[in-house]
Image: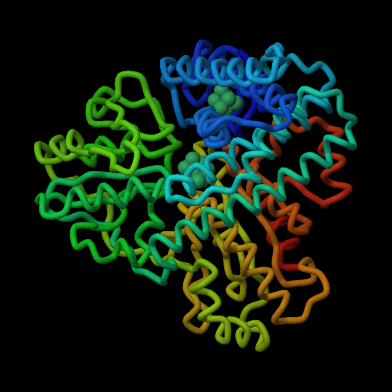
Amino acid sequence: MFCFQCQEAAKGTGCTVRGVCGKGPETAELQDRLISALKNLAVTARASGGKVGDGEGLFVAKALFATITNANFDDARFVSLITEAEDRALRLAQKSGLTVGTASQGVLATENPDVRSLRELVIYGLKGIAAYVEHAAMLGREDTTVYAFFLEALAATEQDLSVDELVALVLRTGHVAVTGMALLDTANTEAYGHPEVTQVDIGVGTRPGILVSGHDLKDFEELLVQTEGQGIDVYTHSEMLPANYYPAFKKFSHFHGNYGSSWWHQADEFEAFHGPILMTTNCIVPPRDSYKAKLFTTGMAGYPGCQHIADRPNGGKKDFTALIAAARASQPPRELEKGTIVGGFAHHQVFALADKVVAAVKSGAIKKFVVMAGCDGRHKERSYFTDVAQALPLDAVILTAGCAKYRYNKLNLGDIGGIPRVLDAGQCNDSYSLAVIALKLKEIFGAADVNDLPIAFDIAWYEQKAVAVLLALLALGFKKIRLGPTLPAFLSPNVVDVLVKNFQITGTTTVEADVAAIMA
Ligand code: SF4
Ligand code: SF3
């Protein structure tokens, strides 16, 4: 196997024996085969004049999504996705009098390191976008231009493109990432209202509970409805925390609050929770036996030996009966902590506070906004992000989204005239909200360039959704993004040079040097 798609790639170069994430070589091979089958499908679809079959776009999105780090470890699911991709390509080819080709398989099939780097950068961006548009599709919002781009870009990774052409494709991927995140933002807010400032309870109740992790709000909604009046509470975990900010979910009195922190703490936290856990997406850590029987997956998430809640039938709902039965037979969660954390600062809520924010900037009370969105991860050096949050001067406000926030969202960093110094917009896809806020500030202050604003970026990345977010920020014109804790292993030195030259991207360095540069 060879995989270098996430920040924890072994030795900073790539996993070759077994994934640091727990992905075995068989699963890695199946994921490579699936990506290759999707490329064949894309090439065939393009050759047939783009006459794609029913549901082709959403199928490609789901399949890409399944290959995201920590989303799915279930080989049987990959085998069935490969079969479906092959069948779809064959049907399309037969209809158009074509034959299905044999696309390259695996990262190392591309020998030129720069071409390999750019092709994989595009593919990882697509994976992130795929996850976001799949969530939007579950809420009834789809954009066929995004699906068409999946096919075009996948097919393009099989063409003999020059480095310049590939760089252009990377940037287009960024623009499509903006479209995808905007689509999900619309889908979420239409369905559940605009996130609002919320004090989230991080303690526990006395009844048994169900813990929901991942990113899928539709699953969360259906579970809340089905658990009403059942004598059990529902809690969010990790990236599901922002569900607490949506008005539509607040009306459920058995929605207790958030339990635990970011994904990589889950083994201890799931064990302590006692009740069943629903993983709606990434990030799954290979489960301990102590709670494996209570770990349920759904959607594109999967783990061998764990119960999987089937997709909703056409026009119907998912059936969470088994999960609810497991909850009723469990003990209440063990208390990990007490108190509250505040969040809900997505674009609509921040615009409502705009007068206050603008006045604070004009008076000099706020000197800098520091975007610290992204992912958390288990490597020790990620304490950097906690240290930066603590070392930033009191006139700096942190804008965050994604599970990166758990590095500093319980620190009580105070407020500036009632504006908290950590403003959490939501999940990693809500980084879109942070970009919208920045563009609004540009308008209010009449800045010619978004990079003239008092905004700095100190982004934490781990998996491919963060790659999509990064490409989206570049496409929107944001420069001087600091990325850590390490630069991606899949960026070749020459590709790093291109990113430095065109976007002044840098890696994180030391807390002191970076805080000084951020505030300069
Ligand atoms: Fe390694 Fe990350 Fe790939 Fe897992 S996803 S095999 S940790 S590079
Ligand atoms: Fe976290 Fe996996 Fe990326 Fe949605 S849950 S941000 S790492």
Name the image quarter holding residue 203.
bottom left
Vertical relation: 354 (above or below) 318: below
Total marks placed: 0
Q: Position of residue 383 (x, y in %)?
A: 54, 47
Q: Position of residue 420 (x, y in %)?
A: 48, 73
Vertical relation: 77 (above or below) 359: above
In the image, 42 versus 109, the foreground residue is 42
Position of the C terminus by quadrant: bottom right
Which residue is found at the position 50% from the left and 19% from the top? Answer: 84
Instruction: Report whether 485 appears left or right of 334.
Output: right
Residue 15 appearing in the image: no
Instruction: Report whether 73 appears left or right of 452.
Output: left
Which residue is found at the position 75% from the left and 61% from the top? Answer: 517
Q: Position of residue 458 (x, y in %)?
A: 66, 55
Which residue is found at the position 38% from the left and 50% from the top? Answer: 217
Q: Quadrant of ligand 1?
A: top right
Which residue is found at the position 66% from the left and 36% from the top? Answer: 150
In the image, 341 versus 56, the foreground residue is 56
